Image (cartoon, helix red, strand yellow):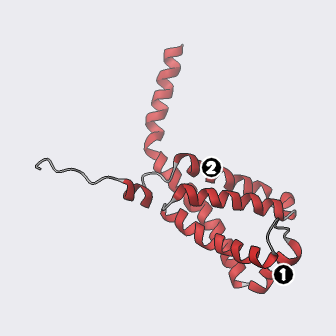
Amino acid sequence: MLSFIKQIDSIGQRIVEPLIPLLLLFTRLWVAWVFFKSGMVKYSSWDSTLYLFEYEYQVPLLPWQLAAYMGTAAELILPAFIAIGLFTRPMTLVLFVFNIIAVVSYPLLWEKGFFDHQLWGMMMLVNIFWGAGLISLDKLISSEPKQSLIE
């Protein structure tokens, strides 16, 4: 019975292993798109953004103006790095913390958007733990040049 279970697991692993780079790319692009889109909304309606940061969001430790600029910048800059897979782990870790701060600082998210933020957090954890994968600039940069057979 144990060998049957191991055999089934081995077959499953061979099936999904080639798909791992696509999963890592999918999670990166999904999270990047969601946060970049949010940053564009903040940027395009700046007066509303300033209002929300002053009166609605309760960002800890930062003045609301600084929080508005930093939050919008984070949502526009970090996703670009994540989407192309450059410095993926540190950029995703910063966005992960940003995601937590967003949930903590805006109580209405608990009611309507908490599940989404949990989903995005889990997707970010995938890339924090396993990196950007084969389809990324991180992989391209880290690949050592192949050595010539004739030296």
Q: Is residue 136 at least partly visible in the picture?
A: no
Q: In which quarter of the image is residue 46?
A: bottom right
Q: Which residue is drawn at 71% across and 71% down?
A: 71
Considering depth in this image, is 25 or 72 the residue closer to the camera?
Answer: 72
Amino acid found under the numbered disc labelled 2: Leu
Q: Which residue is drawn at 69% across and 84% down?
A: 44
Say whether marks 2 and 1 touch (CB < 8 Å): no
Q: In this view, does 10 lie to the left or right of 44?
A: left
Marks 2 and 1, how far apart in space? 32 Å
Q: How many C-alpha atoms fall within 10 Å of the one at disc 1: few (<14), some, or many (≥20)?
A: some
Question: Disc number at residue 30?
Answer: none
- Residue 18: percent from left, percent from top: 43, 44
Q: In which quarter of the image is residue 14?
A: top left
Residue indicated by mark 2? 125
Is residue 148 depicted above or below 15 in this figure?
below
Question: Disc number at residue 51?
Answer: 1
- Residue 125: percent from left, percent from top: 62, 49
- Residue 5: percent from left, percent from top: 53, 20
Going from N to C along the chain, the mark reached first, 2 or 1, is 1
Q: Which residue lies furthest to the left in this view?
A: 150
Considering depth in this image, is 69 or 80 the residue closer to the camera?
Answer: 69
Considering depth in this image, is 80 or 59 the residue closer to the camera?
Answer: 59
